[in-house]
Image (cartoon, rainbow, N blue to C red):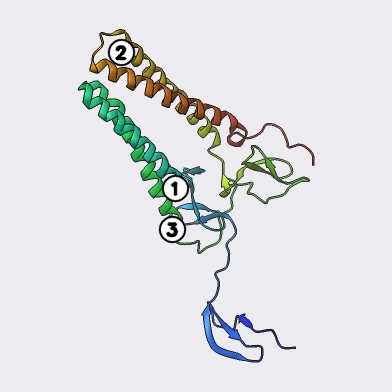
Amino acid sequence: MSAPQGWYDAGTPGLQRWWDGVQWTAHERAAAPATLSMGWYPVPGTTDVRWWDGVMWTPYRVRAGKPRPDWLAVEPPAMGVVLGILFFVLGMLQLFAALVTQNPGNFIFPALLLSVAVVWIVGAVYSHGVRKLPAPQSAPVVDAVVQPLPGEVDGPDAGWYPMTRQVSRWWTGSRWSWYIGTKFGPRPGHAGPRGYLTSMIVGWCVAGLAVIGAIVAVVGSVMEQSPITVVMIVFGVFIALIMGGLGAFALLLTRARRNALLLPATPPPVR
């Protein structure tokens, strides 16, 4: 019985030929590229070993003998753009207030906010560029540094187990892996402990800025009323509210993601 009509491999590497149900035709097309499984692959043309999630490169690579995210990793890149714009707007508002008061010390805070905005934007551009690197062209790298990988099984009940509503972690059957499942796909989580500590520090620092804003507002309210003190009060209240909200959000979010960032101390519940 003849094969049904369709595109088939006719022996030409990288090409498929149309079979009309009876014979080959002259119509050819490029063969669909083979899908590479997720894993750590050498990046073509570089010395980097980077995590390929099966679709694209991610901002995670083996550096100094350990899997770590890039310094400017932002995922997804669009989030970096949004946060960059947010900090830019806040920085410009603070810069305007500093220009009104003409106090040299007031220019430090807007400079800090604008610097953070630049970091987020640069990170977004960098992470977008990582996604566009050439696809892997060699076998994946598998060694003790990156194991156990997702999919490795060495006992019963292996699989993905939820850590939070949006994140799961791979259990091999006898031990937890550092890899977590996210809405973007499986990602290395080896830097989770450092990320947890950093997030807590950032959250408390932002909360500290809220306290500074409140102090500025109080000082402005007890000084002799003038256009400058009005600006101080408005500026202080604005910073206290914005930074207080951001700090609280960062701390609560970090706390909620504790199980996703840190390796669980106990096995998962029996299924």
The answer to which of marks 3 and 2 sits earlier in the sequence is 3
Would you call the spot at circle 1 few (<14 residues within 10 Å), some (14-19), or many (20 or more)?
Answer: many
Any mark on residue 132, and which?
3
Identify which residue, 52 or 113, lies in the foreground: 113
The amino acid type of the residue labelled 1 equals Pro
- Residue, x 27% and y 15% (percent of image)? 229
Q: Is residue 72 visible?
A: no
- Please state the horizontal and vertical placement of residue 232, each as a whole percent of the image: 30, 18
Any mark on residue 77, and which?
1
The answer to which of marks 1 and 3 sits earlier in the sequence is 1
Identify which residue, 139 or 225, lies in the foreground: 225
Circle 2 residue:
220
* Number of residue marks: 3
* Residue 37, above or below 1: above
The amino acid type of the residue labelled 3 equals Lys
* Residue 67, above or below 201: below
Of marks 1 and 2, the one in the foreground: 2
Of marks 3 and 2, the one in the foreground: 2
Q: Residue 182, located in which quarter of the rendered image?
A: top right
